[in-house]
Image: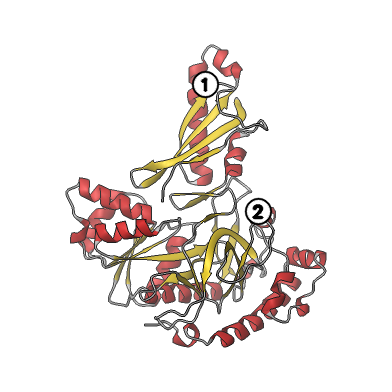
Amino acid sequence: MFYNEEFETLPREAIKALQVKRLQQVLQRVYHTVGYYKKAFDAAKIQPDEIKSLADLHKLPFTTRQALRDNYPFGLFAVPMSSIVRLHASSGTSGRSTVFGYTKHDVETWTDLMARCLVAAGLTKNDIIHNAFGYGLFTGGLGLHYGAEKIGASVIPMSGGNTKRQIMILQDFGPTTICCTPSYALHLAEQAKAMGIDVKSLKLRVGIFGAEPWSKAMSDEIEKIYGITALDIFGLSEVMGPGIAMECLEGRNGMHIFEDHFIVETIDPQTGKVLPEGSEGELVFTTLTKEAFPLIRYRSGDVSRLITEPCRCGRSHIKMERVLRRSDDMLIIRGVNVFPSQIEAILVDIEGLESHYQLIVDKAGALDSLELHVEVSEKIFSESGGVKELQNIEKRIVKDMKDYLGISPRVKLVEPNVLQRSGGGVGTKVIDKRRI
């Protein structure tokens, strides 16, 4: 079953021809409308009309997450604000997040891509979709919502949190599909069990899960607990949001990347060299149809492998394996992207803290947990009234982390020189104890 059979089943040569045509158009457009790209192309001594084929793509410079931050908020937009109908943003400290714009046509394109994903999962207008991806500045909830409405399905816009109410809605409204992070699906099941509810008694038959890395074992566990088919969806807020790639019902061994809208490359994270299709490496995306926020050779930081073997479903678009790991220091905590540098930016603004800290990421039941240990100056420990001051600092850290990053860590303040250092004097900053 297809949403757009013509494009989803294009012969490989036709896909590549379409990619070249759209690539040449987008390169001309960004060169003449986005100052960053004109400077980057000129610095690389490459002009858009020199890109004649996909084999020439490697000549173009990469776009990095740092470039997005450096051009905050609207420096990479290719259209005037009068053409922007939607803004989304990633988490980040004030002035350091990344902002993404959408024209009316971009929203329509995104909607169609999400409709493709849902149809690939076997959904129709007869389904009721419980959408527990986050709404708001994050791209997950609204992206999926519009696609669900496009295929005529009924949508329950739950967003995240409020677990007991989610369970009540799952019982009372009888949705056939649940969409959320895989860890939240397991958390819902745990809470339901504590309430004396067997999630197998629900009407759910399909789950669409993403926004965080998860293993085949975790997928199997969800399927066993719920008695459903668990499918993987892939998205990047910078590139579009959810809807870049989707696992179909037939293959169950990777997600189709919609290549009429995105070019994907695999590179060596260390050297930047393009690797042959099928090699494990960092995925790099070029958008072909985005108007407001086109990206050229964007380094995703996600390490995976492309699957070139034909799929039984009939879709001709290349597939990607589940994301194996990150090539950078980004952490994904309950679906939120967090960089240690963002935490450092928060801590440096709080008086009384030393420069050394440690993040401990673990699991609390099915959900991720984050504990933050921070060294406090000797002066605060030695002063009278220090206990109250420590409590105020702890509250400030928790509040700023929640306000700026959308996460609430457990904070432990420690004396100077307590946290482990490496040979270079820099703290061992991240300990990730999770097993996905």
Can residue 132 be seen by looking at this rendering? no
Query: Does the image show residue 297?
Result: yes
Q: Nearer the viewer, residue 95 or 430?
A: 430
Colour pattern: secondary structure
Residue 364 spot, x, y in % from top left: 36, 41
Q: Upstream in the sequence, badge 1 or badge 2?
A: 2
Task: Give the residue number, with chain letter if any, for mark 2.
Answer: 69
Up the image or down, 143 lies above or below 340; here it is below
Picture coordinates of residue 381 (x, y %)? 55, 16
Dividing the image into 4 quarters, which one contains the N terminus?
bottom left
In the image, what residue type sits under mark 1?
A: Glu
- Look at the numbered discs 1 and 2 and tell me whether their residues touch, using CB distance below 8 Å: no
Real-space CA distance between mark 1 and mark 2, rounded to the nearest whole angstrom: 34 Å
What amino acid is found at the position of numbered circle 2 in the picture? Arg
Task: Identify the residue under disc 1.
Answer: 389
Residue 260 numbered tag: none
Q: Residue at x 58, y 48 (%)?
A: 329
User: Seen in the image, is 176 located left or right of residue 327?
Assistant: left
Pointer 1 local density, CA inside 10 Å: few below 14, some 14–19, many at least 20: some
Q: How would you rate the neighbour count of disc 2 (Cα within 10 Å): few for under 14, some for 14-19, many for 20 or more?
A: some
- Where is residue 237 drawn, in percent x and y? 54, 61
Tell me if 378 is positioned left or right of 200 in this view. Answer: right
Foreground tag (1 vs 2): 2
Q: Quadrant of residue 81?
A: bottom right
Q: Position of residue 145 (x, y in %)?
A: 40, 67
Relative depth, front residue between 180 and 77: 180
For the residue labelled by badge 2, is the local secondary structure a helix, a strand or a loop? helix
All told, the count of numbered labels is 2
- Between 201 and 241, the one lying in front of the other is 201
**Secondary structure of the residue carrying numbered label 1:** helix
Q: Quadrant of residue 133?
A: bottom left
The residue lying at 35 percent from left, 56 percent from top is 218
